[in-house]
Structures are given as C-alpha cells and as structure tokens.
Image (cartoon, rainbow, N blue to C red):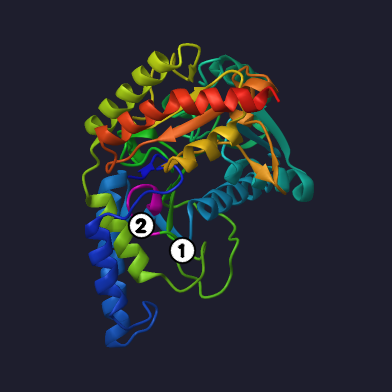
Amino acid sequence: MSVYLDHAATTPMVDDAISAMTAQMRQLGNPSSLHTPGRASRKVIEQARESLAKEIGCVASEIIFTASGTEANNIALKGLYWKGKGVGRNVIVISAIEHHAILDPAQWLSDHEGAEIISIGVTSAGVLDLTQLSELLADRADEIAVISIMHSNNETGVLQPIDHVVALASAHGIAVHSDAVQSFKKVPLSFSELGLTALSLSAHKIGGPLGIGVLVLKRGLEIPALLHGGGQEREIRSGTLNAPAIVGASAAASASYLSDHVRALRNELVEGIVRVIPDAYINGANAEKLLPGIVNATFPGTESDTLLLLLDAQAIAASTGSACSAGVQRPSHVLLAMGHNDKSARSSLRFSLGATTTLADINQVIEALPSVIERARAANLR
C-alpha cells in the first residue's frame, strides 16, 4: 500500500470539486461575452466568488482570480512595490523563510527595478523576529513600500504573527501582504480580521484543481498590472476566466477540512519518530502555533535526498522541502534561518498530512523508518 505524505505540495481533489468542475467543463460560454452562454458562465463565476469570499472573510469584489498562488504573490509584491515606489518608497521587507514565490520576485525587483530587499530573521523555533521588525520600522518606515510575511511556513508548518505585523505596519501606513497558501482551511483565516492589504491563496492545496489561485486585494486599492489585455479582474489580471477551475476551487473551499483528524495523526507521527529514532529532531516543535499537518524532522547522519529515495522505494512519498536547481541539492533556506548548518539542514525531511491520511499510513511510516535511517546512515559513511 502506498503512503502519500506530501500534501503540502499538492493534495487530492475532493469529490465536490471534481463534480463541480466536471459539470462546468460541459458548459459553453466565455464569461466576458454578452450573449446568454457568456452570461451563464459569468453567473457561476460570480456565485463562486461570493462563496469564496465567505470562506476567506473578505468582500467578493476583493477577490482576483489568478492561475496560481505564485502568480498571486507576484502580482501583489510587484504591484504594491511599484505603487510605493511611485511615492518614493523603495524598500521591500520579507522574512528569511519565505517561499520562493516571494523570494524570487523580490530578487527580480532588486535586480531590475532598484528595490532594496530587507530580510527579517526568525527564532530557532521558526517564528518571525518581531523585535527586528519593530526596530526597522522605527528607523526606516517612510522608505518601506510593502511588507510580505507568509501566514505559515510551508516547510515547518510554523504560523507567523501576522496580526502583530499588521499592527506594526498600520501605524506607519505600510501595505502588508501575506502568502497564506498553506494556511487556508487548515487554521482560522480571515482577511478582514487580519487587516491585510493583500493575501494569496491556491486551490490545489485544499482539494481543489491545479491552475487556479486567488489574490485578495483590499477594495478601492489599485495597483499596476502584470498582465494587460481584456481588463478582467479589476484590470489587474487580464485573461479569460477559467470557469471550471473557479467553481472547483469554490467547491473545495466550501468542504470541511478535518483539522482535528489531521492534527491527531500528526501527533502520532511525531511521537513515533522520536520513539523509533531517539536522536531525531522535530523542527519548529517549540513554536506556539503550528499547522495541523506538517512535520519537519532532522535525522542526524543522513542525507535527505537518500532518505527520500529509500522511503520512495517503500512506497512512501515525502519531501525534502528544499530547493533543487539544475540537479544540485541545496540545504533548506528555512532551516538555515532557524540555525541549522548545511549538514543538518541536508538531513531533514518534511512529512505533510491531509484529510485522506490514515492511522495505517502513519504506522507504515513509523515501521519503515528504523531500517530507512540505518541504511541512509550507512550510505552516508561510504
């Protein structure tokens, strides 16, 4: 029996999303067309927008549909930076543990648009250093165009203090964006209650289809567009709207996420790991708040890519959680920011659970780990 513990990468579509998407794929009509089929397509999109708004805690008109969470991040970060740059603000503030969907566009803005990027560190538990952020704002607030801090980390599952970030930034009139791709439906999340300027989400992390993301942008706020064309989505994201994917995303967001079930299984996995591998270390375990379904474990004396292959050979899918470029494995920048060295960062795996995970899956992983770790350590000594 195969075990899939890589839900943070993508998760199986829920039945309601498959049904809604399949039904819509049989319908004809460009939602920008004025004829009857076009208006029918537009109607289902707006109904989906209203439904999603209730789940996100925002106004329907604040939702901008994109093709991915990555695109939503790019639109938000670049658009808010360009808006700030227009009034003399040239600094972008991010955390040291952001996803590459923020790190890379930030670097692009530095290379091509003259942005200054300031990275805020994290504690050994993986939580944003609010003291460092406060000191930066006290010194250079009038230079900052946008602050972008993820709601929860995709590698460790550690939740970040976004409410405190917004409170600090609001005192200086600074826009705050948050990548909440991993958090949506797994923990309480409300755009309006957080007071954010912008928020990014992705459907395929919650049982929806691939290829559809959401940018929530505060109403009344206009930012420069990345895509120009038909003027769809407040003229911020032109392009024919993907009605089947949008209704699939809405259906997935309306489905219940079994947080208690997933958290209980996560706890079983953590307890099992430290029981069968006593020197294993659970990253982020000391954080006050965690996502219910992510376990990032360091196994001293191993290489994460070897672990991954050995687990895969036993039909267990996990993740290294680190970037891989041109076939060269790199240590996780998240773990390095938390105080790991290159060696220990390369000895870590991410197990991410979802609603379809079972206790049998967890037991299978725990049973397989001793031999996997033993073989990985032996390979590392050669």
Q: Residue at x 26, y 69 (%)?
A: 44
Q: Do the residues under discs 1 and 2 have CB atoms within 8 angstroms?
A: yes
Residue 64, located in which quarter of the rendered image? Answer: bottom left
Counting from the top left corner in percent of width and height, residue 157 is at: 44, 29
Q: Quadrant of the C terminus?
A: top right
Give the labeled residue for mark 1: 234
Which stretch appears magenta?
A: 203-209
Counting from the top left corner in percent of width and height, residue 99 is at: 56, 39
Under tag 1, what secondary structure?
loop
209 and 314: which one is in front?
314
Question: Distance of mark 1 from mark 2, alpha carbons?
Answer: 9 Å
* One can see residue 5 in this view: yes
Three-letter residue code for mark 1:
Arg
Say whether residue 271 is left or right of residue 143.
Answer: left
**Does the stretch in magenta take in 208?**
yes
Give the labeled residue for mark 2: 61
Counting from the top left corner in percent of width and height, residue 367 is at: 36, 27
Say whether residue 299 is left or right of residue 291.
Answer: right
Say whether residue 201 is left or right of residue 25.
Answer: right
